[in-house]
Amino acid sequence: MAQSRQRPLSPHLGVYRWGPHMLVSILHRATGDGMAILGGLGLTWWLYAIASGPAAYANFQYYAWEAAPGDALGAILNYLCRIIMVGLSWAFFQHLCSGLRHLVMDMGAGYELQGNRRWSIVVFVAAALATIAFWAWIVAGRAA
Amino acid sequence: MGSGTRVGRVRGLGSAKSGAHHWIAQRVTAIGNALLMPWFLISLALLPAYDHAAISGWLAQPIVAVPMLLLVISVFYHVRLGLQVCIEDYVHDDGLKFAVLVLLTFFTVGCGAVCLFSIAKIAFAGGAL
């Protein structure tokens, strides 16, 4: 085999400093995985519950959002589901922003070190702001 | 990875010649998601109520049901493509990789089918479920 000869290897693959571009890259995969599994199941559960009628939807709402007071298991599930929903919304905005960054990079632009670093930071800031704005509207804006 | 050696090339272990389609389909569904998901989230945020009558009445409208059907197709297709890349990168055992890829296909097609059927049922029932 021509490839089995000893080839020189880069000696310090494990030595590097974390930068925002690395974090935005691995978070694109992590948020995509999280949305695929939890978001995919959640969307399916939600649509199936609506299609199954008011009783099934009430059951969905009970466990996903508001259980009866005194139901300890329901309360735990409510907290879990709310954390997951906020997490999924952040994951969506993060994945959307870094996905748009990838579409720009697919065109061959945005590889200069300074610009790449700057846009990576913009991705984090935009995703955080969008998540805060979305939930601020749901919790406070709607009620007002 | 037989693309580099002569014997690999003889055995046909080179590129499968379908990578570009996968790559482009991932981008096309990404653009679809980038249009449909903000529409979905903004519409949800603007709904007056979240009880069954309000949600099913909203989903039953053709102007909502059709984009929802498109969203489910675009999202689950994108999930199928994206997770395939992750699995191929991190699962190295051939048998396990095959099993996980089959599981991924069943998961995305199965969830997608349930979602499409649910939207169609809500829409054809006209909100009266």
Image (tube, coloured by chain):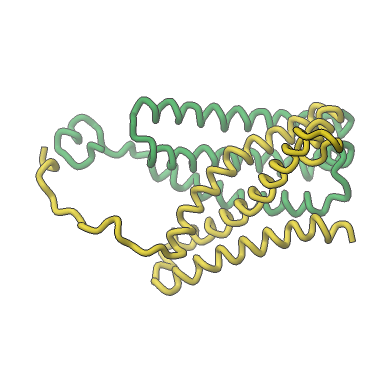
What percent of the width, then of the height, locates residue B83? Answer: 48, 40
Q: Please state the horizontal and vertical placement of residue A77, each as a whole percent of the image.
A: 72, 37
Q: Which residue corresponds to the image point at 81% horizontal and 28% vertical from the top-left? A: A56
Above or below, B11 against B37 in this view is above
The residue that appears at 86% across and 30% down in the rendered structure is A54
Chain B shade: green
| Displayed quadrant of residue A108 | bottom left
> Closest to the observer: A111 or A80?
A80
Q: In this view, does B96 lie to the left or right of A10?
A: right
Judged left or right of residue A71, residue B90 is: left
Left or right side of B107 for B17? left
Query: Image point 11% across, 37% down: which residue?
Result: A1
Residue B48 vertical position relative to residue B7 in the rendered view, above or below? below
Viewport quadrant of the C terminus of chain B = top right
In this orientation, does residue B9 appear?
A: yes
Q: Position of residue A63 (x, y in %)?
A: 77, 35
- Who is closer to the viewer here, A142 or A70? A70
Q: Quadrant of residue A62?
A: top right
Q: Where B68 falls versus A95 (above or below)? A: above
Q: The yellow chain is which one?
A: A
